[in-house]
């Protein structure tokens, strides 16, 4: 039986999970420096111990209702193969171990059609948790670098 651990967080009362192997740390949202001419889902960058980290707002990327960023929000710092990215979430609730059999992977057609980074849905008791492919956030930053809109 293969299991994986996921950090569970919320965006607009929906639960999402990211594999814990990508999660470096969880912080209160610090001051974010805006960068002109970025796509709306890029909030800007932060200085984290001397490193410039791009910050993504998945609510904007997924077309969810927007709320003012407050002290209640959290910033997940993801370590994505030699690139760090921050994502703003409403709340981080827990770390859960999920049996692979409890995960229903989405078909490739749905994943590419939606372009929303959801790779599967986990059934945990009576809850459905959308599991995100963290590396898709990295791919979004790379697309911007290739287009010459953003450089780290």
Image (tube, rainbow, N blue to C red):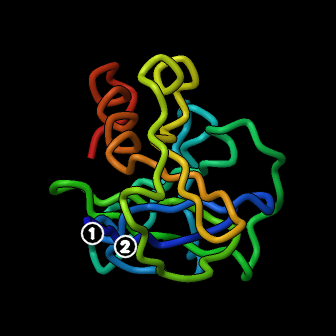
Q: Residue at (48%, 38%) from the top-left corner? A: 117
* Residue 123 point in image, percent of width and height: 58, 59
Q: Is residue 112 left or right of residue 2?
A: right
Q: Considering only vertical position in the picture, is 139 above or below 51?
A: above
Q: Is residue 22 left or right of residue 122?
A: left
Q: CA distance from mark 1 to mark 2?
A: 8 Å
Q: Quadrant of residue 148?
A: top left
Q: 82 or 99, which lies in front?
A: 99
Which element carries disc 1, helix, strand or loop?
A: helix
* Residue 131 point in image, percent of width and height: 50, 53
Q: Is residue 103 left or right of residue 53?
A: right
* Residue 112 point in image, percent of width and height: 46, 20
Question: Could you say which disc has been placed on residue 21 in the image?
Answer: 1
Q: Considering only vertical position in the picture, is 15 above or below 5?
A: above
Which element carries disc 2, helix, strand or loop?
A: strand
- Say few, some or many: other residues with alpha carbon within 10 Å of mark 1 (under 14 / 14 to 19 / 20 or more): some
Q: Considering only vertical position in the picture, is 66 above or below 115?
A: below
- Say few, some or many: other residues with alpha carbon within 10 Å of mark 2 (under 14 / 14 to 19 / 20 or more): some
Q: Nearer the viewer, mark 1 or mark 2?
A: 2
Q: 135 or 39, which lies in front?
A: 135
Q: Residue at (48%, 27%) from the top-left corner? A: 111
Mark 2 = which residue?
A: 5
Residues at marks 1 and 2 touching, judged by CB atoms closer than 8 Å: yes
């Amino acid at each position: 039986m293969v299991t994986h651990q996921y950090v569970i967080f919320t965006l607009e009362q929906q639960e999402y999970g990211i594999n814990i192997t990508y999660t470096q740390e969880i912080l209160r949202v610090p001051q974010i420096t805006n960068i002109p001419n970025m796509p709306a889902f890029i909030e800007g960058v932060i200085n984290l111990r001397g490193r410039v980290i791009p910050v993504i707002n998945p609510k904007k990327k997924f077309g969810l209702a927007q709320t003012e960023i407050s002290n209640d929000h959290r910033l997940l710092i993801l370590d994505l193969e030699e690139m760090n990215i921050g994502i703003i979430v409403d709340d981080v609730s827990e770390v859960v171990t999920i049996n692979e059999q409890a995960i229903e992977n989405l078909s490739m057609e749905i994943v590419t059609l939606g372009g929303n980074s959801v790779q599967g849905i986990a059934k945990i008791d009576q809850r459905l948790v959308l599991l995100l492919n963290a590396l898709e956030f990295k791919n979004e930053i790379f697309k911007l670098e290739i287009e010459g809109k953003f450089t780290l």
